[in-house]
Image (cartoon, grey):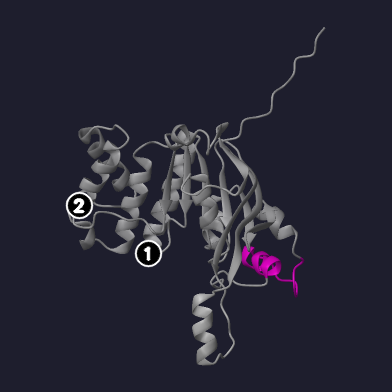
Amino acid sequence: MVEKKVGQPIYGLTVRDITKHFHRTKKSDEKLRLPEKIRRLFKREKEIIHAVDGISLDVNIGEIYGVLGANGSGKSTLIRLISTLLLPDSGSIHVFGDDVVTHSMKVRRVMNRVSVEASFFKRLSSAENLVYAARLYGISAVEAKKRAQVILERLGFEAKRMDEEMEQLSRGMQQKVAIARALLTTPMLLLLDEPTTGLDPKSKRDVQTFIEEIRDERNAVILLTTHDMAEAERLCDRIAIIDNGKFIAEGTVEELIAKVPPQNNTLVTLEDVFIAFTGKDLEEEED
Protein backbone atom coordinates (compact mmCIF):
# COMPACT_ATOMS: atom_id res chain seq x y z
CA MET A 1 0.00 0.00 0.00
CA VAL A 2 1.42 3.37 -1.04
CA GLU A 3 1.45 5.92 1.71
CA LYS A 4 -0.31 9.13 0.75
CA LYS A 5 1.86 12.21 1.06
CA VAL A 6 0.42 15.01 3.14
CA GLY A 7 1.10 18.47 1.73
CA GLN A 8 2.30 21.44 3.72
CA PRO A 9 -0.52 23.36 5.44
CA ILE A 10 -1.52 26.59 3.73
CA TYR A 11 -1.52 29.40 6.27
CA GLY A 12 -3.41 32.59 5.66
CA LEU A 13 -0.12 34.48 5.86
CA THR A 14 3.42 33.10 5.67
CA VAL A 15 6.51 35.30 5.95
CA ARG A 16 10.00 33.82 5.54
CA ASP A 17 13.26 35.63 6.36
CA ILE A 18 12.06 39.01 5.09
CA THR A 19 14.54 41.88 5.03
CA LYS A 20 14.15 45.53 4.05
CA HIS A 21 16.96 48.03 4.36
CA PHE A 22 16.97 51.77 3.72
CA HIS A 23 19.82 54.26 3.26
CA ARG A 24 19.83 57.65 4.93
CA THR A 25 22.29 60.45 5.52
CA LYS A 26 24.41 59.68 8.54
CA LYS A 27 23.87 62.01 11.47
CA SER A 28 26.80 63.50 13.31
CA ASP A 29 27.02 64.98 16.81
CA GLU A 30 30.38 66.59 16.09
CA LYS A 31 30.76 70.36 16.28
CA LEU A 32 32.28 71.19 12.92
CA ARG A 33 33.93 74.32 11.56
CA LEU A 34 32.19 76.02 8.66
CA PRO A 35 34.57 74.71 5.93
CA GLU A 36 33.99 71.12 7.15
CA LYS A 37 30.24 71.63 7.24
CA ILE A 38 30.32 72.87 3.64
CA ARG A 39 32.48 69.91 2.56
CA ARG A 40 30.06 67.45 4.14
CA LEU A 41 27.11 69.03 2.37
CA PHE A 42 28.61 67.82 -0.91
CA LYS A 43 29.87 64.50 0.40
CA ARG A 44 27.30 63.09 2.75
CA GLU A 45 27.97 59.78 4.41
CA LYS A 46 25.19 57.21 4.18
CA GLU A 47 24.15 54.64 6.76
CA ILE A 48 22.03 51.53 6.37
CA ILE A 49 18.81 51.25 8.39
CA HIS A 50 17.74 47.64 8.95
CA ALA A 51 14.00 48.34 9.09
CA VAL A 52 13.03 44.66 8.81
CA ASP A 53 15.81 42.22 9.46
CA GLY A 54 15.15 38.51 8.88
CA ILE A 55 11.55 38.25 10.12
CA SER A 56 9.53 35.03 9.75
CA LEU A 57 5.97 34.32 10.89
CA ASP A 58 2.91 32.19 10.16
CA VAL A 59 -0.66 33.34 10.80
CA ASN A 60 -3.43 30.75 10.76
CA ILE A 61 -6.84 31.28 9.24
CA GLY A 62 -9.09 32.73 11.92
CA GLU A 63 -6.19 34.04 14.01
CA ILE A 64 -5.32 37.54 15.23
CA TYR A 65 -1.54 37.87 15.31
CA GLY A 66 -0.11 40.90 17.09
CA VAL A 67 3.18 42.70 16.51
CA LEU A 68 4.11 44.74 19.55
CA GLY A 69 6.83 47.36 19.24
CA ALA A 70 7.94 50.88 20.01
CA ASN A 71 7.76 53.66 17.44
CA GLY A 72 10.39 53.06 14.76
CA SER A 73 10.86 49.38 15.56
CA GLY A 74 9.88 48.19 12.06
CA LYS A 75 6.26 47.14 12.47
CA SER A 76 4.81 49.56 9.90
CA THR A 77 7.49 48.61 7.36
CA LEU A 78 6.51 44.96 7.84
CA ILE A 79 2.85 45.84 7.13
CA ARG A 80 3.84 47.74 3.97
CA LEU A 81 5.84 44.75 2.73
CA ILE A 82 2.94 42.35 3.24
CA SER A 83 0.49 44.77 1.60
CA THR A 84 2.74 45.04 -1.53
CA LEU A 85 3.46 48.74 -0.96
CA LEU A 86 7.16 47.90 -0.59
CA LEU A 87 9.27 45.19 -2.23
CA PRO A 88 11.42 43.07 0.10
CA ASP A 89 15.18 43.01 -0.38
CA SER A 90 15.16 39.28 0.34
CA GLY A 91 12.86 36.57 1.67
CA SER A 92 9.30 35.72 0.68
CA ILE A 93 5.71 36.52 1.68
CA HIS A 94 2.72 34.35 0.75
CA VAL A 95 -0.97 35.17 1.27
CA PHE A 96 -3.16 32.05 1.07
CA GLY A 97 -0.32 30.40 -0.84
CA ASP A 98 0.26 33.22 -3.37
CA ASP A 99 3.52 35.17 -3.49
CA VAL A 100 2.92 38.88 -2.89
CA VAL A 101 5.56 39.90 -5.44
CA THR A 102 4.77 37.60 -8.38
CA HIS A 103 1.00 37.55 -7.79
CA SER A 104 0.51 41.01 -6.32
CA MET A 105 -2.79 41.78 -8.10
CA LYS A 106 -4.36 38.52 -6.96
CA VAL A 107 -3.17 39.10 -3.40
CA ARG A 108 -4.52 42.65 -3.28
CA ARG A 109 -8.01 41.39 -4.06
CA VAL A 110 -8.16 39.38 -0.82
CA MET A 111 -6.53 41.86 1.56
CA ASN A 112 -6.95 45.38 2.82
CA ARG A 113 -5.08 47.64 5.19
CA VAL A 114 -5.91 50.17 7.89
CA SER A 115 -3.19 52.64 8.79
CA VAL A 116 -2.90 55.32 11.42
CA GLU A 117 -1.80 57.54 8.51
CA ALA A 118 -5.00 57.03 6.50
CA SER A 119 -5.66 59.74 3.91
CA PHE A 120 -8.89 60.92 2.30
CA PHE A 121 -10.35 63.51 -0.03
CA LYS A 122 -10.99 65.96 2.80
CA ARG A 123 -13.57 68.08 0.96
CA LEU A 124 -15.69 65.02 0.23
CA SER A 125 -18.00 63.37 2.75
CA SER A 126 -17.26 60.01 4.36
CA ALA A 127 -19.99 58.47 2.17
CA GLU A 128 -18.40 59.88 -0.99
CA ASN A 129 -14.94 58.69 0.04
CA LEU A 130 -16.25 55.20 0.75
CA VAL A 131 -18.20 54.96 -2.50
CA TYR A 132 -15.12 56.07 -4.45
CA ALA A 133 -12.97 53.41 -2.75
CA ALA A 134 -15.59 50.71 -3.32
CA ARG A 135 -15.93 51.54 -7.03
CA LEU A 136 -12.21 50.78 -7.45
CA TYR A 137 -13.06 47.21 -6.45
CA GLY A 138 -16.08 46.98 -8.76
CA ILE A 139 -18.69 47.48 -6.03
CA SER A 140 -21.71 49.53 -7.10
CA ALA A 141 -22.44 52.87 -5.45
CA VAL A 142 -25.75 51.59 -4.07
CA GLU A 143 -24.15 48.50 -2.55
CA ALA A 144 -21.21 50.53 -1.22
CA LYS A 145 -23.51 52.97 0.61
CA LYS A 146 -25.46 50.09 2.11
CA ARG A 147 -22.32 48.31 3.33
CA ALA A 148 -20.75 51.54 4.57
CA GLN A 149 -23.75 52.47 6.70
CA VAL A 150 -23.85 49.02 8.33
CA ILE A 151 -20.13 49.03 9.11
CA LEU A 152 -20.03 52.62 10.39
CA GLU A 153 -23.03 52.11 12.65
CA ARG A 154 -21.38 49.02 14.14
CA LEU A 155 -18.34 51.19 14.84
CA GLY A 156 -20.47 53.76 16.67
CA PHE A 157 -20.51 56.27 13.78
CA GLU A 158 -23.93 57.93 13.37
CA ALA A 159 -25.37 57.43 9.88
CA LYS A 160 -26.66 61.02 9.79
CA ARG A 161 -23.04 62.28 9.82
CA MET A 162 -22.02 60.33 6.71
CA ASP A 163 -22.73 63.36 4.51
CA GLU A 164 -20.43 65.72 6.43
CA GLU A 165 -17.12 66.65 4.83
CA MET A 166 -14.19 64.63 6.16
CA GLU A 167 -12.38 67.77 7.32
CA GLN A 168 -15.30 68.46 9.67
CA LEU A 169 -14.94 65.11 11.44
CA SER A 170 -12.81 64.40 14.49
CA ARG A 171 -9.62 62.34 14.27
CA GLY A 172 -11.43 59.39 15.83
CA MET A 173 -14.33 59.54 13.39
CA GLN A 174 -11.94 59.74 10.44
CA GLN A 175 -10.21 56.62 11.71
CA LYS A 176 -13.54 54.80 11.82
CA VAL A 177 -14.09 55.76 8.18
CA ALA A 178 -10.64 54.33 7.38
CA ILE A 179 -11.62 51.05 9.02
CA ALA A 180 -14.93 50.99 7.14
CA ARG A 181 -13.09 51.61 3.87
CA ALA A 182 -10.88 48.57 4.46
CA LEU A 183 -13.85 46.35 5.34
CA LEU A 184 -16.06 47.31 2.39
CA THR A 185 -14.27 44.73 0.25
CA THR A 186 -14.76 41.91 2.82
CA PRO A 187 -11.03 41.10 2.92
CA MET A 188 -9.86 37.68 4.11
CA LEU A 189 -6.54 39.19 5.23
CA LEU A 190 -6.85 42.38 7.25
CA LEU A 191 -3.71 44.36 8.05
CA LEU A 192 -4.27 46.73 10.96
CA ASP A 193 -1.42 49.17 11.56
CA GLU A 194 -2.17 50.79 14.94
CA PRO A 195 -5.88 51.14 14.05
CA THR A 196 -7.03 52.62 17.38
CA THR A 197 -4.30 55.24 17.84
CA GLY A 198 -5.89 58.58 18.68
CA LEU A 199 -9.33 57.17 19.49
CA ASP A 200 -11.20 57.96 22.69
CA PRO A 201 -11.75 55.00 25.07
CA LYS A 202 -15.30 54.24 23.88
CA SER A 203 -14.35 54.41 20.19
CA LYS A 204 -11.37 52.20 20.89
CA ARG A 205 -13.61 49.57 22.50
CA ASP A 206 -16.06 49.81 19.58
CA VAL A 207 -13.27 49.15 17.09
CA GLN A 208 -11.77 46.30 19.13
CA THR A 209 -15.17 44.61 19.42
CA PHE A 210 -15.69 44.93 15.68
CA ILE A 211 -12.26 43.41 14.96
CA GLU A 212 -13.22 40.39 17.06
CA GLU A 213 -16.54 40.10 15.22
CA ILE A 214 -14.82 40.24 11.81
CA ARG A 215 -12.47 37.44 12.83
CA ASP A 216 -15.32 35.28 14.15
CA GLU A 217 -17.80 35.93 11.32
CA ARG A 218 -15.41 35.56 8.40
CA ASN A 219 -12.69 33.36 9.88
CA ALA A 220 -10.40 36.11 8.61
CA VAL A 221 -6.64 36.36 9.03
CA ILE A 222 -5.75 39.52 10.96
CA LEU A 223 -2.32 41.04 11.55
CA LEU A 224 -2.38 43.83 14.13
CA THR A 225 0.47 46.16 15.01
CA THR A 226 0.09 48.14 18.20
CA HIS A 227 1.89 49.68 21.15
CA ASP A 228 -1.22 49.38 23.33
CA MET A 229 -0.62 46.57 25.85
CA ALA A 230 -4.28 46.19 26.82
CA GLU A 231 -5.30 46.01 23.17
CA ALA A 232 -2.70 43.33 22.47
CA GLU A 233 -3.83 41.28 25.46
CA ARG A 234 -7.49 41.54 24.52
CA LEU A 235 -7.28 40.84 20.79
CA CYS A 236 -4.24 38.76 19.98
CA ASP A 237 -4.03 34.97 19.92
CA ARG A 238 -0.26 35.25 19.59
CA ILE A 239 2.13 38.17 19.89
CA ALA A 240 5.60 38.90 18.53
CA ILE A 241 7.77 41.60 20.09
CA ILE A 242 9.75 43.52 17.48
CA ASP A 243 12.85 45.61 18.17
CA ASN A 244 15.30 47.10 15.65
CA GLY A 245 13.63 45.19 12.84
CA LYS A 246 13.87 41.77 14.50
CA PHE A 247 11.41 39.52 16.33
CA ILE A 248 12.98 38.97 19.74
CA ALA A 249 10.12 37.03 21.38
CA GLU A 250 6.93 35.30 20.26
CA GLY A 251 4.07 33.41 21.88
CA THR A 252 0.73 33.74 23.58
CA VAL A 253 0.38 36.33 26.34
CA GLU A 254 0.71 33.54 28.90
CA GLU A 255 3.82 32.12 27.22
CA LEU A 256 5.50 35.51 27.05
CA ILE A 257 4.71 36.31 30.69
CA ALA A 258 6.12 32.93 31.74
CA LYS A 259 9.50 33.91 30.23
CA VAL A 260 9.99 36.78 32.71
CA PRO A 261 10.52 36.01 36.42
CA PRO A 262 8.39 38.06 38.83
CA GLN A 263 10.02 40.76 40.94
CA ASN A 264 9.13 41.26 44.61
CA ASN A 265 6.31 38.70 44.37
CA THR A 266 4.30 40.92 42.00
CA LEU A 267 2.44 39.62 38.96
CA VAL A 268 4.28 40.04 35.65
CA THR A 269 2.45 42.12 33.05
CA LEU A 270 2.87 42.27 29.28
CA GLU A 271 4.53 45.66 29.76
CA ASP A 272 7.08 44.04 32.09
CA VAL A 273 7.76 41.46 29.38
CA PHE A 274 8.29 44.16 26.76
CA ILE A 275 10.69 46.14 28.95
CA ALA A 276 12.57 42.97 29.93
CA PHE A 277 13.18 42.00 26.29
CA THR A 278 13.81 45.44 24.78
CA GLY A 279 15.07 47.57 27.65
CA LYS A 280 12.75 50.40 26.60
CA ASP A 281 9.15 51.50 26.93
CA LEU A 282 6.70 51.65 24.07
CA GLU A 283 6.70 55.41 23.69
CA GLU A 284 10.41 55.71 22.93
CA GLU A 285 11.30 56.92 19.48
CA GLU A 286 14.06 55.28 17.46
CA ASP A 287 16.57 57.46 15.61
- Separation of marks 2 and 1 at Cα, in angstroms: 22 Å
Q: Which numbered dot is residue 200? A: 1
Helix, strand or loop status at disc 2: loop
Within 10 Å of the Cα at label 2, are there few (<14), some (14-19), or many (20+) other Cα atoms?
A: many
Query: Where does the image place residue 129, in percent across and percent down from the top left?
Result: 24, 48
Query: Where does the image place residue 246, in percent across and percent down from the top left?
Result: 66, 58
Q: Is residue 34 left or right of residue 89?
A: left
Inspect the image, locate mark 2, and give the three-letter code of the amino acid beneath it: Ser
Identity of the residue drawn at 34% across and 53% down: 176
Residue that carries the numbered disc 2 in the rendered image? 125
Q: Earlier in the sequence, mark 2 or mark 1?
A: 2
Query: Where does the image place residue 41, in percent across and percent down from the top left?
Result: 49, 78
Q: Is residue 67 left or right of residue 184?
A: right
Q: Depth check: give the residue in front, 228 or 7.
A: 7
Inspect the image, locate mark 1, and give the three-letter code of the amino acid beneath it: Asp
Instruction: Indicate which label's residue lies in the foreground, 2 or 1.
Output: 2
In magenta, the rendered stretch is 261-278
